[in-house]
Amino acid sequence: MLASRDLRNGNEGVLRFDPRTGTYQVGMLESGSLPVSRAHLVLVNARTGDIVGFVERDWDYAVDGFPSARAGTSGPLDRP
């Protein structure tokens, strides 16, 4: 999915750290042509660098905030 998208035209890169789980959330927020923004993320173990999961879900700006404004902070990306 991520390889087929460009980071422009409504697509934003996302890099966040969640200290509760010790994982980085890395990927893309797709919002350009969709009625609701969609997060496409991989979860990476901060100590080992192993991929430990994937997240595909709607992005709620009221709950999740804006990626550029919250860079480096934790967020509720584990919600369904």
Image (spheres, helix red, strand yellow):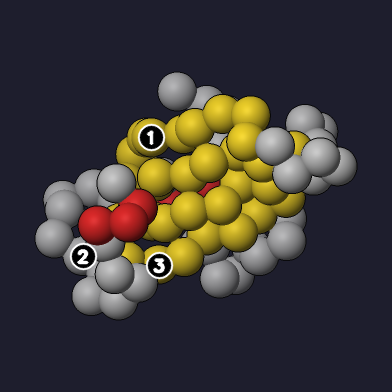
Disc 1 versus disc 2: nearer the observer: 1
Q: Residue 34: x, y in percent? A: 16, 53
- Going by the numbered disc 1, the residue's amino acid type is Glu
Question: Between marks 3 and 1, how big is the CA–CA gap?
Answer: 15 Å
Mark closest to the chain's N terminus, 3 or 1: 3
Q: Who's the residue at 70% across and 37% down the image?
A: 50
Is residue 33 something that shows in the picture?
yes
Secondary-structure class at tag 2: loop
List the residue tagged with mark 2.
Answer: 32
Q: Residue at x 61, y 46 (%)?
A: 25
CA gap between label 3 and label 2 equals 9 Å
Look at mark 1 in the image and give the residue it sits on. 56
In what element is the residue under mark 3?
strand
Residue 75 visible at all: no
- Residue 47, image x, y percentages: 86, 42
The part of the image, by quadrant, that contains residue 31 is bottom left
- Location of residue 40 with respect to 3 vertically, above or below: above
Q: Is residue 54 above or below residue 42?
A: above
**As shown in the figure, which amino acid type bears the numbered disc 2?**
Gly
Q: Which mark is residue 12?
A: 3
